[in-house]
Amino acid sequence: MNDLDHEVLTKTWEGLLTRFEGPSAGTLIIEHADHVVGYSRFYPTDDEDDDSTQVGMIGSIYTLPDVWSTGVGKALITAALDTMTSAGYAQATLWVLEGNTRARSFYERNGWHHDGAVVVDRSDILPITKLRYRKDLNR
């Protein structure tokens, strides 16, 4: 990790953490033994077919592979959804790579469903297909 430019990373994260302010957005982290093992970011949806006052989007949710299948991911997504519910969202969405069967299975086990929306990102050499998953939030 010596090749990482810590100044660039710091500025990137400062930008991400301040992009949205207030109770409708946030970044959650999970620590274990004083180390961050996972994080999630949520904010009002930027999908044009949804109402950003009612639908929050999980823009990222990541855990270290060392903590997969230990309950950390479940705890993280539960905390994110609880926070989103408290912020007043009625639904949550997220985008997942079509081929990421591990993540899709995780979301489906936790009550999410593919809502039919699909995007194909052609910005790289190969097209990347993403599916939108959705979950109703109980108030």
Image (tube, rainbow, N blue to C red):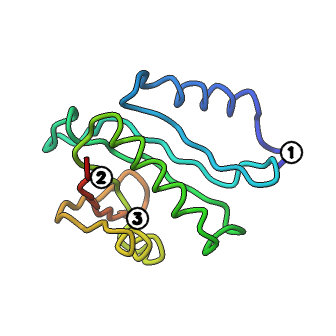
- Closer mark to the observer between disc 3 and disc 2: 2
Q: 10 Å neighbourhood of mark 1: few (<14), some, or many (≥20)?
A: few
Mark 3 and mark 2 lie on one chain; the one further toward the N terminus is: 2
Relative vertical location of residue 88 with respect to residue 133 in this rendering, above or below: above
Separation of residues labelled 3 and 2 (CA atoms):
25 Å
Q: 10 Å neighbourhood of mark 3: few (<14), some, or many (≥20)?
A: few
Locate residue 134 relative to residue 6 in the image: left or right: left
Where does label 3 land, which residue?
126
Element type at marker 2? Answer: strand
Element type at marker 3? Answer: loop
Image quadrant in which you'd find residue 118: bottom left
Q: Which residue is nearer to you in this view: 55 or 118?
A: 55
Asked if the residue under mark 2 is in contact with the one under mark 1, i.e. CB atoms within 8 Å, the reply is no
Asked if the residue under mark 2 is in contact with the one under mark 3, i.e. CB atoms within 8 Å, the reply is no
Where does label 2 land, which residue?
93
Residue at the extreme front: 139
Q: Residue at x 67, y 61 (%)?
A: 64
Separation of residues labelled 1 and 2 (CA atoms):
36 Å
- Closer mark to the observer between disc 1 and disc 2: 2
Q: Residue at x 51, y 64 (%)?
A: 74
Image quadrant in which you'd find residue 24: top left
Relative vertical location of residue 69 with respect to residue 87 in this rendering, above or below: below
Q: Residue at x 41, y 22 (%)?
A: 22
Q: Which residue is nearer to you in this view: 115 or 48?
A: 115
Q: Which residue is drawn at 39% across and 48% down?
A: 58
The amino acid at mark 3 is Leu
Image quadrant in which you'd find residue 54: top left
The amino acid at mark 2 is Thr
Where does label 1 land, which residue?
2
